[in-house]
Image (cartoon, rainbow, N blue to C red):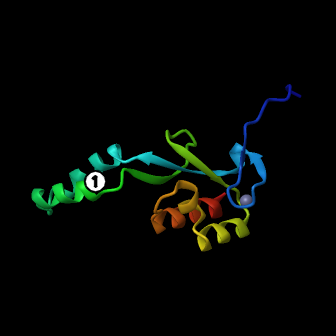
Amino acid sequence: MARKKHIPQRMCIVCRVRFDKKDLTRVVKQKEKDAQNASDKQKEKDVQKASDKQKDTQKVAHKIIVDESQKADGRGAYICKKAECYEILVKQKRLNRSFSADVPSDVYTELGKQLGSK
Ligand SMILES: [Zn+2]
């Protein structure tokens, strides 16, 4: 057998148990810049420029995504694959707490898909 590799470990934000990083799903909070460019292009079709400018000033300065590659920049939070952890995560909105931010419900939905598919 090959010699034992060091496997990075991370803590599940719900049960606070440490797991191998690969056994956790990572959610990451990123700066809004990149996301904004992408969505602006789509919006341009039917939204007036004037109203876009107003929105920009009110926009939050970040976005939160499920990081499938586990390599995205930004502040990460990890969740293990236990169904009960996901339940608590959703019920108590743990991600909101973890990131001190409003996490859109589709992030939770996406996370559920990720956890269910592996
Ligand atoms: Zn857990």
Q: Which kind of residue does numbered mark 1 sit on?
A: Ser
Residue pushed farthest right? 1
Residue at 67% x, 70% y is: 88
* Rendered position, 1 above or below 109: above
Query: Considering the image in quadrants, where does the C terminus appear?
Result: bottom right
Is the distance from the Cβ of mark 1 to the nearest ligand 1 atom less than 8 Å? no
Identified at 78% across, 31% down, the residue is: 6
Kindly indicate the quadrant of the structure image that contains residue 15: bottom right
115 horizontally vs 104: left or right? right
Residue linked to disc 1: 39
Question: Left or right of 5: which side holds 13?
Answer: left
Q: Secondary structure at mark 1?
A: helix
Whether residue 7 sits left or right of residue 53 in the image: it is: right
x and y percent of residue 73 in the render?
49, 39
- Count of marks placed on residues: 1
Between 39 and 102, the one nearer to me in the picture: 102
Which one is in front, 75 or 41? 75
The image shows residue 56 at horizontal and vertical percentages of: 24, 54
Q: Quadrant of the N terminus?
A: top right
- The local crowd at label 1, few if under 14, some if 14 to 19, many if 20 or more residues have their Cα within 10 Å, is few
Residue 34 at x, y = what percent? 34, 43
Residue for point 76% across, 35% down? 7
Q: Quadrant of ligand 1?
A: bottom right
Q: Residue furthest bottom?
A: 91
Question: Is residue 102 shown above or below 65?
Answer: below
Task: Please indicate whether residue 112 sits to the left or right of residue 3 in the image.
Answer: left
Residue 101 placement (x, y as % from top left): 47, 59
